[in-house]
Image: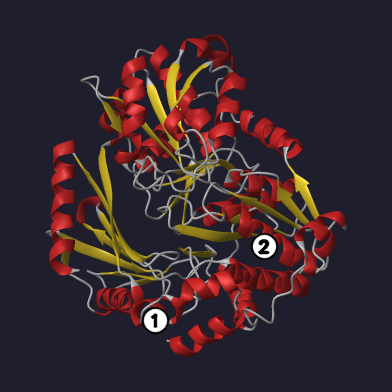
Amino acid sequence: MLDFQKEYRNWLNNADSATRLDLSSLNDAEIQDRFYRTLEFGTGGLRGVIGAGLNRINKYVVGQATQGLANQLLKTSNNSKCQGVAIAYDSRNMSPEFAEEAAAVLAANGIKVYLFESLRPTPELSFAVRYLNCASGIVITASHNPAKYNGYKVYGADGSQITPETSNIISSEIAGTDIFGGVRHMDFESAKTLGFIEIVGESIDRAYIDRVKEQSVNPSLVSVKGGDYTLVYTPLHGSGNLPVRRVLDEIGFKNVIVVSEQELPDGNFPTVKSPNPEEKEGFAIAIKYAEIHNADLIIATDPDGDRVGIAVKDAYGKYRTMTGNQVGVLLTEYISSQGSLPENGTVVKTIVTTDMVRGICQKYGLELAEVLTGFKYIGEKIMEFEESGDKTFVFGFEESYGYLKGTYARDKDAVVASMLIAEMALYYQMQGLTLYEQMQNLYNEYGYYTEDLISVTMEGASGIEKIKGIMENLRSVPPKKIGGLKVSAVRDYKTAQKRDIVSDEIQAIFLPKSDVLYFELENGNSFVARPSGTEPKIKFYLMCRGESETETENLLENIKEWVKQNI
């Protein structure tokens, strides 16, 4: 823990007048919370509450992080100055300002910057890094977090989020950079005049949209029937608004009804508690629109346009949301069933994503690859497949509402997912099915799978210690049963070992080391514990399968009760 009073005084002596004014009104507890640690830089970059202090995100923390990135680029990339860095940002409060701050720091280090003229979705930044042959990329976003948060994500030259190795180098450079005296800075307007900062927009938009449209599975169907299909779309005040509508319109969906209350960018997200398409609450206004217009589908994207959630009519005509796992399974089946697949075609999912997709891959002769939690690992697989040439990427998804078809980007893309979901819904409508009914068909064919996520927030220094304690306890004294189900094996991704409980046999896990515990339970059920890398949370993933929906729901409830009693 840092000497928070010392750090506080340092800021009072060196920060600008507005920051000093903000800090002067804090009580001792608030001072400790803002200065007891630095905001941690990990593979997800930075994410924190907006405000003054080391444990907050602000222009000083962003500047220090960018100086660390600049140092890393100049030391490890021979051509980083001419290759440059692409920067995008979303609709969050302070996103444009933080983007300009990062651009000004890079320019001061002699590194060319390509800064988007206005907000853009995160996957377009991933695309732009490779399209512009950049050494790196930055997105200012806190994804689907509440309005008080913002963040800073870094991408490598391959368009994927940075690896743990790169993150460690940048983190070390940040630690060695004085937050006030060690950050180089050039006047933003001067940097533009001198050519260090280039403002970009439509030419990259056009190239990105074209690559997205190439991923359409049934373009002729949409061009003929898309004009008759009604769907409701909400960008939840974020960056998906223009690109999602543009793609849908260009491929043939002409009756897209946009939720006007949530159409325009607004970092306060005034119509929702959290701009998260994973939560049903975010669909409340859109459902009213759908009921009025008798829409067949509702699509919602998050602020930085990389996650998408949907709501569809159930057997009673009521709109109900679908989980990320369900949508991923539907898309995998749809993509796999439509025409020829490449030789050695491979679907990639994370270890906490539904196993239901295994049956689909087996049916269609596809390989299934598993990676650690985080779409960057799916992006790494795409690059690995391209370099080796022995596998072809078909589709990738994660339970947290992230999907990608195509290799134009190396991160989840709500724009391409929105297009494919709308196309898929139209296709099944032509077969006389809603997406809800098609999901029931898949359960009947592949078995019933139900998943859930328990996310526990533990703020402050004590919270971090509690999270560490939970993981240490689960690791040192693993439970024999979870929710009444016997533990058959424990995968510890921190030690890269899997231990069979019955035989005590140890097997190596060939994935990067990570603080994740995966408990294999009897009858194909699973329980996973994982601290969040970007928030003060510990997450528990529950994955159940059975012969019926009722059976899986009961299994799920038993595990939830076990968590409540034991964690």
Q: Which residue is the extreme one toward the right?
A: 194
The kind of residue on which mark 2 rests is Glu
- Residue neighbourhood size for the residue with mark 1, other residues' Cα within 10 Å, grouped as few (<14), some (14–19), many (≥20): many
Q: Is residue 160 visible?
A: no
Q: Is residue 433 left or right of residue 314?
A: right
- Residue 286 spot, x, y in % from top left: 36, 29
| Residue found at x 43% / y 16% | 230
Q: Quadrant of the N terminus?
A: bottom left
The kind of residue on which mark 1 rests is Gln
Image mark for residue 397: none
Query: Foreground residue, 278 or 417?
Result: 278
Q: Is residue 508 left or right of residue 478?
A: right
Q: Is residue 469 visible?
A: yes
Query: Foreground residue, 527 or 231?
Result: 231
- Residue 444 spot, x, y in % from top left: 25, 29
Q: Earlier in the sequence, mark 2 or mark 1?
A: 1
Q: Secondary structure at mark 2?
A: helix
- Residue neighbourhood size for the residue with mark 2, other residues' Cα within 10 Å, grouped as few (<14), some (14–19), many (≥20): many
Residue beneath disc 1: 32
Residue beneath disc 2: 101
- Residue 236 spot, x, y in % from top left: 44, 38
Q: Quadrant of the C terminus?
A: bottom left
| Residue found at x 45% / y 80% | 35
